[in-house]
Amino acid sequence: MLKTASTAAAGYFITLVLSAAGTASAQGSASNPAANYPNRPVSVVITYIAGSSTDGEARLYTDKMQQSMGQAFIYDYRPGAGTTIGVNHFVNAAPDGYTIMVHNTSMAVFPNFYPRTNHEVVKRIATISVLSSRQSAVIASTAALPGVRSMKDLAAYGKANPDKLNCITSGVGGITHIVCLAFAQALGIRITPVHYKGVSEGQVDLIAGRAQLYTGPVYSSSKLARAGKVHMLAIIDRVRSRIMPDVPTSDEQGYYFKYPSWVGAFAPPKTPRPIIDRLNAEFVKAAHHPDVVKMLDAGGSIPVGSSAEEFRSRYHEEMEYWKKIVDDHKITIE
C-alpha cells in the first residue's frame, strides 16, 4: 500500500513537471515567435511576371536563405494594375512570417494613385531590408527610333513629331509609368505610356519597333544595347554606369530628374518584431554572400542589406519625393 502511494505520488510529480515544462515552452514560444521559425515553406509574393528582374534578384537571396533556414521559399506571382493586385493580396496575408514580398521602387510610387492601398501601405506594412540598389537608364528602340542616340535627339524628335512617341510600362501608376512621364516633362515633349503586365512583355515590342521607349535597370538592358537592339540614351544618375561607361548621365546632358532604384523585402502588417529581425538577419547575411555579391556586381547592382529601420525611413522619404513629382507634373491616371 505504501509502495503504491509512493508510486502514485511520483507519477503525479512527474506529470506536474512535464506540464510545467510544456507551459514554459508554450510561453517561451509565445514571447518569441521566431523561436521555431520557419517550420514550413515561406511564400514570396512577386508583383511582376515570372522572369522579371525583381523576381531574379529575389531568388538570388532566397536560394541562400533556404539553405541557412532549412525551408523552401515558394514564389507567388501576382502581376498587374501597377503592382496593386499583388500588394493588396500581400497586405491581407497572415502576419506570421510565412508570406513576404520582394518589391522595388514602385512601392513608393503607386500609393499616390490608390488612396485605399496608400492607407494600408503607409500605416501598416512592415519593412524588412533594402536588398540592393541599382542604376536605371532611358532606352530607345533601335528599330523604331534609329536616329535617336541622345536625350537631345529625343527632345528634337518629340517636338518635331508631337504625340507620336510611346513608352512601355509595367502598369498604370508604377515606377516605369511615372518616370516616363517625368522625363517627358523634363524634355518638354509628350509621350504616351503603353501598359503591360510586365516589362519583359513590353521589351518584345520594343525590340520589334512596335514600342519606342523604356526606362529601366541598366543591367537588364545592357545586353540589348551591346547587341544594337536598343540605344541607351542616358543613365538616370549623377554618375555613369560602371557596366556602360560610355553612356552619359541625364545630368551631363542637361536634363535633371532622378530615379532612385532599389529592391527590398517587406512583411505583412503586424508581423512580430522577432520574425522581422530573423528575416532581416537572413537577408543581410545573403546580401554579403560572395555568390550574391558576384551576381549582383556582374549585373551592375550594389548589394545593400539595410536594417528594417533604415529601409522604413528611406521608403517614406521616397513616397514624399514621388508625390511631389506627381503633383508638380500634374500626373494623373486616366
Image (cartoon, rainbow, N blue to C red):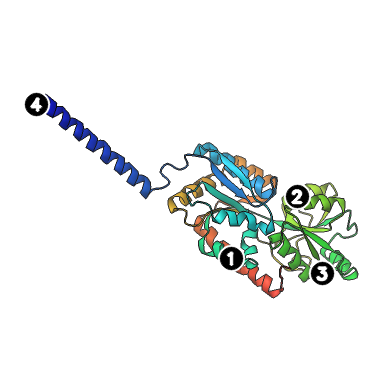
* Amino acid type of the residue that numbered disc 2 sits on in the rendered structure: Ser
Task: Give the position of the N terminus as an image quadrant.
Answer: top left
Judging by the rendered image, the residue that carries numbered circle 3 is 190
The residue pinned by badge 4 equals 2
How far separated are the C-alphas under marks 3 and 2? 24 Å
> In the structure shown, which secondary structural element does the residue marked by tag 2 occupy?
helix
The kind of residue on which mark 4 rests is Leu
Crowd tier of the residue under label 2, counting other residues whose Cα lies within 10 Å: few below 14, some 14–19, many 20 or above: many
- Residue at the spot x=50%, y=59% of the render? 309
Tell me which amino acid carries mark 3: Arg
- Specify which label sits upstream in the sequence, 2 or 1: 1
Q: Are marks 1 and 4 in contact (CB under 8 Å)?
A: no
Horizontal and vertical percent position of residue 119: 55, 66
Disc 4 versus disc 2: nearer the observer: 4
Q: Report the residue at 59% width, 54% height from top.
A: 89
> Does residue 30 appear to the left or right of 112 in the view shown?
left
Task: Please give the residue where the numbered disc 2 appears in the rendered image.
Answer: 200
Q: Earlier in the sequence, mark 1 or mark 3?
A: 1
Q: Disc 2 to disc 1, how far (Cα)?
A: 28 Å
Q: Local crowd at mark 4 within 10 Å, few (<14), some, or many (≥20)?
A: few
Q: Which residue is depicted at the point 53% across and 59% down? A: 125
Q: Secondary structure at mark 3?
A: loop
Tags 3 and 2 touching, CB below 8 Å: no
